[in-house]
Image: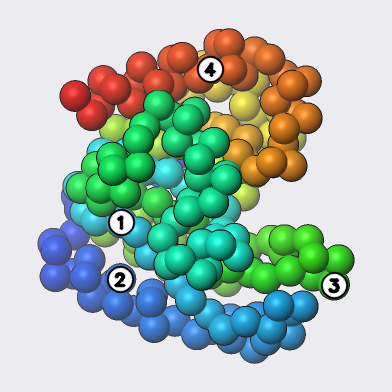
Amino acid sequence: MTHKNPSPATGSTADALTAQIRACRICADRFAATATGHQPRPVVWFRPGARILIAGQAPGARVHASGRPFTDPSGDRLRDWLGMDETTFYDRDKVAVIPMAFCFPGYDARKADLPPPPICAETWHQQVMAALGDVQLTVLVGSHAHRWHMGTKAPVTQTVANWRDHAPQVFPLPHPSWRNTAWLKKNPWFAADLLPVLRNRVQEILT
């Protein structure tokens, strides 16, 4: 299941929504109780009319500090997967980055990433998708995005292995984190079969 969006919002409506999200503090108490004890900093990166949607998980610590999505090694790997340079990736007229939670969720006591709080998507996601409008390509990064956009609870490997069922409009990917390096080595078909098709699709849309 994928979510088809209505016509994009006007610039003023989208700007107002962006301002509301950036001012959101509904998770302030939740974040204060994490091992990082940080304040909310929503990272909002979309503009109506973008052609490609990157649906991710949640900002990490480096993105929390920079205020720009995927300014970390995961972003470097993702851009390589897409065959896209930084200038294009950060052009909001071309690419929207909409995670399942706009803020860094923090670390637990073992310094592991906490999952994106569901309340963020419940509060904002439908509004943002409606403001964005139809896109030509949706790239789903990680299991949380798979579940919301595709309605699946299948394991990541199974979902990604079935990518042909959804291409060329939707491509489910694993998360580009270094933690998935072993997964990439165990599943060489991902780089051999999926990535060339994804890169070609990106170039078709951008040229």
Q: Are marks 2 and 3 in contact (CB under 8 Å)?
A: no
Q: Are marks 3 and 1 in contact (CB under 8 Å)?
A: no
- Of badges 3 and 1, nearer the viewer stands 3
Provide residue 63's location: percent of width, then percent of height. Answer: 51, 62
Provide residue 49's location: percent of width, then percent of height. Answer: 19, 47
Residue carrying label 2: 18
- Of badges 3 and 4, nearer the viewer stands 3
**Residue 133 can be seen, yes or no:** no
Label 4's element? helix
Q: From the viewer's perspective, is residue 130 above or below residue 76?
A: below
* Residue type pointed to by label 3: Ala
Q: In whole angstroms, how far apart are the C-alphas of marks 3 and 4?
A: 36 Å
Residue carrying label 3: 109
Q: Is residue 77 left or right of residue 8?
A: right
Give residue 86's quadrant in the image. top left
Q: Earlier in the sequence, mark 2 or mark 1?
A: 2
Residue for point 79% across, 70% down: 108
Residue carrying label 4: 194
Give residue 150's quadrant in the image. top right
Q: Quadrant of the C terminus?
A: top left
Residue nearest the observer in this picture, 80 or 52: 80
Q: In whole angstroms, how far apart are the C-alphas of marks 4 and 2?
A: 33 Å
Q: From the viewer's perspective, is residue 181 above or below residue 31?
A: above
Provide residue 160's location: percent of width, then percent of height. Answer: 62, 26
Q: In whole angstroms, how far apart are the C-alphas of marks 1 and 4?
A: 26 Å
